[in-house]
Image (cartoon, helix red, strand yellow):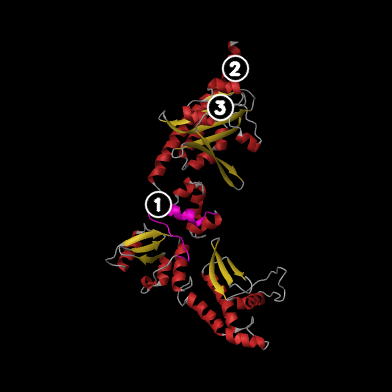
């Protein structure tokens, strides 16, 4: 018996040494992680490889919402799963009482009640995925032996038996490393607030996605706000709220209803304002309100104070594209600046020209003439609509005729939102529509079937 034991000792010792080295390598990776997502997502497989288990879930503690949450990668993104800290789930129970749970069958009610009378297994994950939970080993992740940091949960021992005492020892070692790492990451994250913390905390974007967007913007792929809006589909309002929280000032989104005090722009270079992303918006008895994308830029703040010496400055934050829209709307200049023209005056001039021809049109119609798609004013109006849509970065132009008794409405879609651009007298609806059809090489006589066309416009 002794000789047989001695022959097994070298293999056992080698296995223990390899296992200890594996555990050490994982704990080193945990301590080296630069953010929480790196642990919850990237180290999932490495930690699971220590155990004879089918799956593993890492939960982190959200101190503000008093919940634990995990992140699960998918092909099209990352899903976040949140669990309340109650007896309604094994992980929630573990987080509430800071007690490990090791059960042989998650669906065995007497076994669960033997641990706590109110303890239940949350079956929602099984129902959603088709996974059948059997054995569970759930272990609390704590710091300083008292502060909840999260929960580590192993699911289904591959051998079909209960998780062993050895499994519990290894989980305990990993949980201690995770507790230290989670605590240090929480401390470091509090030291360096960023402009987009609210987006991350509200699950609009993961920290990894935000970090990558910042890297992409620095490479010159696009500015950061455009990447967040267009690539990550984050609404402008959410970005604005995050900026407002960071800069501790109100957020103002572009709206055609917001009146800009154009007197404040009289002696200012609009090209300079667009390039530096700020503008005076309005003034009252106490201060001038300045719209900027970065109220924390000290050089810009000093420049603004030199521009308005002796006056009180009140800041509001806005997105760069909104500031450009405000400037374009207020001054009539295109985003390129320079020789821009008054948008409203141009359109008004053309419409005024059409109105003055109204009486002549009536006379001409009785003689078989009248305004048509080739009339100079109609041609200029169609061109002006397209040019103004381009200047305002519109993605769509809506021409909406409402019959003979209502004016034809023209709307632009900018950043997913439609707003009214102008109204055209009802008597010119057919002429303007026909003009656009001609520009797109469509059949102007066809009014029932949908048609596709393109306009090349310089």
Q: Which residue is mark 2?
A: 7
Q: Residues within 10 Å of mark 3 (few under 14, many from 20)?
A: many
Task: Report if the CB atoms under discs 2 and 3 are less than 8 Å apart.
Answer: no
Q: What residue lies at 51% left-to-right and 78% top-to-bottom?
A: 348
- Which residue is situated farthest in the left direction here? 310
Question: Is residue 6 a member of the stretch shown in magenta?
Answer: no
Residue 193 x/y as whole percent: 40, 48
Which label number is shown at residue 237? none
Tag 2 or tag 1, which sits nearer the N-term? 2
Question: Percent x, y for residue 213?
Answer: 50, 53
Q: Quadrant of residue 402?
A: bottom right
Question: In the rendering, at what x and y percent does residue 448 appear?
Answer: 72, 70
User: Quick one: label 2 or label 3, which is nearer the N terminus?
Assistant: 2
Q: Which residue does the image show at 44% across and 38% down from the upper left?
A: 63
Residue at the extreme front: 405
Q: Is residue 438 left or right of residue 9?
A: right
Q: Picture quarter containing residue 299?
A: bottom left
Identify the magenta region. 233-257
* Label 1 SS: helix
Q: Tell me which numbered mark, 3 or 1, is placed earlier along the sequence.
A: 3
Residue bearing the label numbered 3: 137
In the rendered picture of this protein, how many numbered marks are placed on residues? 3
Query: What's the CA distance linking mark 2 and mark 3?
Result: 33 Å
Instruction: Please state which of residues 370 and 316 is positioned toward the viewer in this rendering.
Output: 370
Disc 3 versus disc 1: distance between alpha carbons?
A: 41 Å
- The image position of residue 166, as x and y in percent, is 54, 23
As drawn, 142 above or below 270:
above
Q: Which residue is mark 1?
A: 246
Closest to the camera, between mark 3 and mark 1, is: 1
The reply to whether callout 3 and callout 1 are in contact (CB within 8 Å) is no
Q: Residues within 10 Å of mark 1 (few under 14, many from 20)?
A: some
Instruction: Write the residue at 51% across / 80% down.
Output: 349
């Amino acid at each position: 018996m002794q000789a047989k034991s001695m022959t097994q000792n070298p293999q056992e010792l080698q296995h223990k040494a390899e296992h200890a080295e594996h555990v050490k390598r994982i704990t080193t990776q945990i301590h080296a992680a630069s953010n929480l997502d790196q642990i919850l997502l990237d180290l999932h497989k490495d930690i699971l490889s220590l155990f004879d288990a089918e799956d593993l879930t890492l939960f982190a503690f959200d101190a503000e919402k008093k919940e634990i949450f995990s992140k699960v990668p998918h092909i099209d993104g990352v899903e976040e799963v949140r669990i309340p800290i109650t007896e309604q789930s094994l992980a929630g129970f573990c987080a509430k009482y800071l007690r490990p749970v090791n059960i042989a069958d998650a669906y065995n009610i007497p076994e669960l009640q033997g641990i706590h009378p109110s303890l239940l297994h949350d079956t929602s994950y099984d129902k959603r995925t088709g996974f059948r939970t059997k054995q569970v080993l759930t272990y609390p992740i704590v710091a300083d032996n008292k502060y909840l940091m999260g929960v580590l949960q192993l699911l289904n021992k591959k051998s079909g038996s209960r998780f062993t005492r050895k499994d519990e020892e290894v989980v305990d070692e990993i949980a201690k490393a995770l507790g230290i790492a989670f605590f240090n990451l929480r401390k470091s994250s509090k030291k360096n607030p960023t402009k987009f913390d609210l987006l991350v905390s509200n699950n609009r974007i993961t920290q990894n996605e935000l970090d990558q967007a910042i890297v992409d913007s620095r490479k010159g792929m696009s500015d950061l706000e455009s990447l967040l809006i267009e690539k990550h589909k984050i609404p402008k309002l959410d970005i604005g709220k995050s900026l407002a929280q960071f800069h501790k000032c109100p957020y103002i989104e572009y709206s055609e209803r917001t009146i800009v005090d154009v007197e404040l722009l009289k002696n200012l270079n609009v090209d300079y304002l667009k390039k530096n992303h700020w503008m005076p918006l309005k003034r009252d008895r106490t201060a001038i309100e300045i719209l900027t994308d970065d109220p924390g830029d000290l050089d810009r703040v000093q420049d603004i104070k030199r521009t308005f010496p002796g006056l009180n400055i009140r800041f509001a934050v806005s997105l760069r594209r909104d500031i450009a829209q405000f400037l374009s709307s207020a001054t009539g200049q295109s985003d390129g600046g320079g020789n821009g023209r008054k948008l409203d005056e141009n359109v008004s001039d053309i419409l005024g020209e059409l109105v003055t021809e109204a009486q002549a049109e009536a006379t001409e119609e009785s003689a078989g003439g009248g305004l048509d798609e080739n009339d100079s004013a109609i041609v200029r109006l169609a061109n002006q609509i397209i040019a103004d849509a381009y200047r305002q970065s519109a993605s769509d132009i809506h021409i909406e005729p409402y019959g003979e008794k209502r004016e034809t409405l023209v709307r632009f879609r900018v950043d997913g939102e439609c707003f009214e651009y102008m109204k055209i007298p009802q008597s010119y609806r057919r002429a303007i529509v026909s003009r656009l059809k001609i520009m797109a090489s469509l059949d102007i006589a066809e009014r029932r079937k949908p048609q596709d066309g393109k306009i090349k416009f310089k």
